[in-house]
């Protein structure tokens, strides 16, 4: 019975929560917030693959998210490509660009990788604004077709987008967990912890890191496509520094090298920034202070809070047991 609970308890709980959540958060504002939180969670958790497990500090994943949104918008609006096929094209385009960007950036080290990938994001913004006839310029592309499957339009009931975002996040998480526990994932951790030793054992550093960047771009690209179809618009705001820092904060606040931590961080920060919206720019100061305090007292992020609590309770139990034995020894004497 215990083995059954361990094996099937968590998956069953996830399924129940996934089915029930769209029925509970069915208001316009709360549902929109939940969908955005799930999509951002996909981007943040995949960003963690390169940032936490591979040790590559980069800003490319927001660009992957935004490029996919624009590819979906452009090919459906201008070229009349059927919905869903545009998502396949977006993933292919993003995978190619991520491979090129990674190959160029990873020839460098440290802060220079972050600078090159940040420049890549700014290049995307410049191209989008300059090519107004194709991208809509600073206004963006409005009128991205709604997602449809077998004649059913997702926009007819926005719970459909909620379920789609949940499926995307669950599939992404399963993929990432499988990846980090594979030999490939272990090679990334080895390169992060001791690159010279890993290379001496035959691990090709550049190849593994480029593959990590490409593999971590797939689900953010799909999330970008869903984002564009859901909001019916592709805007340069996707590439904004505020969104970049927000998603990076989700990853750091939740806990790097955990996969689950950035998901929690994404949901927490999305809800919190909306709840504090009435405070204007002050809310960003509050969020920044929260991140600083978390990194100071919980370096492992929110996800490490559970482990820290378990260690604390374990020490208390051991201390209590030692105290009890001491009392018993004194009583016998």
Image: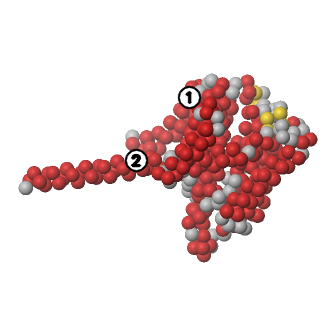
- Using residue 27 as the reference point, say whether residue 122 is left or right of it: right
Q: Which residue appears at 68% of the width and 32% of the height?
A: 161
Residue at the right extreme of this rendering: 133
Task: Identify the mark at residue 309; answer none if there is no mark.
Answer: 2
The answer to which quarter of the image holds residue 197 is bottom right
Q: Nearer the viewer, residue 240 or 174?
A: 240
Task: Identify the mark at residue 20; answer none if there is no mark.
Answer: 1
Give the image location of residue 171, x and y in percent. 63, 44
Task: Identify the mark at residue 33; answer none if there is no mark.
Answer: none
Residue 221 visible at all: no
Above or below, 295 against 163 in this view is: below
Query: Which color scheme does this rendered protein use?
Result: secondary structure
The answer to which quarter of the image holds residue 68 is top right
Give the image location of residue 271, x and y in percent. 59, 35
Give the image location of residue 154, x and y in percent. 73, 29
- Using residue 216 as the reference point, say whether residue 190 is left or right of it: left
Residue at the bottom extreme of this rendering: 200
Q: Which residue appears at 76% of the width and 37% of the height?
A: 228
Q: Which residue appears at 83% of the width and 38% of the height?
A: 140
Tell me the crowding category of disc 1: few under 14, some 14 to 19, or many 20 or more residues within 10 angstroms, Cα based. Answer: few
The N terminus lies in which quarter of the figure?
Answer: top left
- First in residue order: circle 2 vs circle 1: 1
Q: Measure the alpha-carbon separation of dots 2 and 1.
A: 29 Å
């Amino acid at each position: 019975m215990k083995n059954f609970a361990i094996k099937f308890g968590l998956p069953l709980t996830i399924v129940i929560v996934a089915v029930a959540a769209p029925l509970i958060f069915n208001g316009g504002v709360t549902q929109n917030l939940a969908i955005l939180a799930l999509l951002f969670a996909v981007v943040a958790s995949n960003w963690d693959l390169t940032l936490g497990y591979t040790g590559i500090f980069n800003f490319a994943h927001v660009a992957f998210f935004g490029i996919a949104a624009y590819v979906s918008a452009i090919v459906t609006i201008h070229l009349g490509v059927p919905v869903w096929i545009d998502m396949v094209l977006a993933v292919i385009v993003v995978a190619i660009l991520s491979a090129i960007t990674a190959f160029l950036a990873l020839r460098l080290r440290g802060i220079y990788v972050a600078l090159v990938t940040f420049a890549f994001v700014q290049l995307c913004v410049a191209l989008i604004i300059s090519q107004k006839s194709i991208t809509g310029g600073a206004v963006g592309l409005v009128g991205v077709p709604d997602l449809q499957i077998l004649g059913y339009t997702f926009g007819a009931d926005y719970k459909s987008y909620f379920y789609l975002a949940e499926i995307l996040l669950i599939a992404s998480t399963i993929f990432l967990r499988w990846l980090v526990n594979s030999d490939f994932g272990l090679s990334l951790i080895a390169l992060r912890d001791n690159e010279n030793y890993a290379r001496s054992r035959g691990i090709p550093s550049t190849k593994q890191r480029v593959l990590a960047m490409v593999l971590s771009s797939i689900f953010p690209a799909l999330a970008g496509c869903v984002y564009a179809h859901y909001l019916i618009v592709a805007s340069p705001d996707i590439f904004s520094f505020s969104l970049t820092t927000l998603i990076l904060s989700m990853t750091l606040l939740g806990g790097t090298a955990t996969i689950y931590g950035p998901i929690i961080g994404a949901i927490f920060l999305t809800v919190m920034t909306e709840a504090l919206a009435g405070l204007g720019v002050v809310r960003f100061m509050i969020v920044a202070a929260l991140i600083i305090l978390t990194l100071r007292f919980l370096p492992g992020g929110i996800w490490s809070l559970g482990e820290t609590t378990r260690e604390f309770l374990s020490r208390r139990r051991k201390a209590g047991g030692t105290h009890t034995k001491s009392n018993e020894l004194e009583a016998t004497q």
